[in-house]
Image (tube, rainbow, N blue to C red):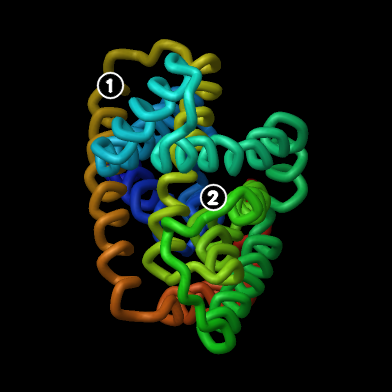
Amino acid sequence: MNILIAALAGLVQGLTEFLPVSSSGHLVVLHALTKFSVEDDVTFDVALHLATAIAVVGFFRQELLSLVRAMALAVLRRGPWSPEARFGGLLLAGSVPAALVGALAEDWLAATFRSVGSVAVALAVVALLMIAAERYLRPTRTMDSVKMKDALVIGCAQALALIPGVSRSGITIIAGLRQGLQREAAARFSFLLSVPVVLGAGVKKLSTAGALPLEELFPLAVGFVVALVSGWWAIGFLLRFVKHAPLNIFAYYRLAVAGVLLLLLPWLAPYAP
């Protein structure tokens, strides 16, 4: 495996896994442009997903430890659940829709919507939803106000991210805004909600990974480190960004990429997976 391509795939995975621009969509395009995709090498695919899983768990390690501790105490003591324990329960409940859809239809969704044209449409549609949410919604709620209905609505939106081009963070933030959550609260809830899904995807893929030849270990390590560092940076960047600015810049980027893909579709389509 080429080291430069490994680093590029790691960068694409790390940045686009957490920025609202769609990691799966960008990887489809990367495959079309370079005739390479992380899906072509299952072990490399596993490494990149584990890198982004470590990034999100590491970034929110203190919050996650507090939630796990609170839930464990609530279960062991069989007493009333604290606000932290209830919030952890909401995250688990919100993860169920994506887990179910992933188990039942992930392969079908990936095969059906994996063309460059489908990715372009998904990029554009979610971009328009993003612009509409920023223009017409005036959310005021904080993360402390999240209820079961909110978690399930956002969780159902997360399931849609199995379609390449949708973007897990993008569609869940839009759903959070629709439920009245402030932009920063919606983004933070989106990232925390991603933890079970990203970890589950990593574990699922780990079961299919095989041994690599010795010469492939260094490119794999490069892709892993690049995905980890860029993913960690992307989480912090987006949380800082949404405090002061709307998501429109990501929407315009998505529309621009969609437009370029549609223009280049006759040349890219023959090389798409």
Q: Dot 2 corresponds to which residue?
A: 24
Residue 64 to residue 135: above or below? above
Q: Is residue 163 visible?
A: no
Tell me which residue sits at (53%, 14%) in the image.
207
Label 1 neighbour load within 10 Å: few <14, some 14-19, many 20+: some
Q: Are marks 2 and 1 in contact (CB under 8 Å)?
A: no
User: For the residue marked with disc 2, what is the amino acid?
Assistant: Ser
Residue found 50% across the figure and 42% down from its top: 37
Q: Nearer the viewer, mark 2 or mark 1?
A: 2
Q: Position of residue 193 (x, y in %)?
A: 48, 45
- Real-space CA distance between mark 2 and mark 1, rounded to the nearest whole angstrom: 24 Å
Q: Quadrant of residue 260?
A: bottom right
Q: Does 270 sit left or right of 142 as displayed?
A: right
Residue 51 in the figure: left or right of residue 44 = left
Residue occupying the far top of the picture: 211
- Specify the quadrant of the image occupied by residue 18: bottom left
Image coordinates for residue 147, horizontal then vertical, percent: 57, 53
At which x and y percent is residue 186?
A: 46, 62
Q: Earlier in the sequence, mark 2 or mark 1?
A: 2
Q: Which residue is mark 1?
A: 217
Q: Amino acid at mark 1?
A: Leu
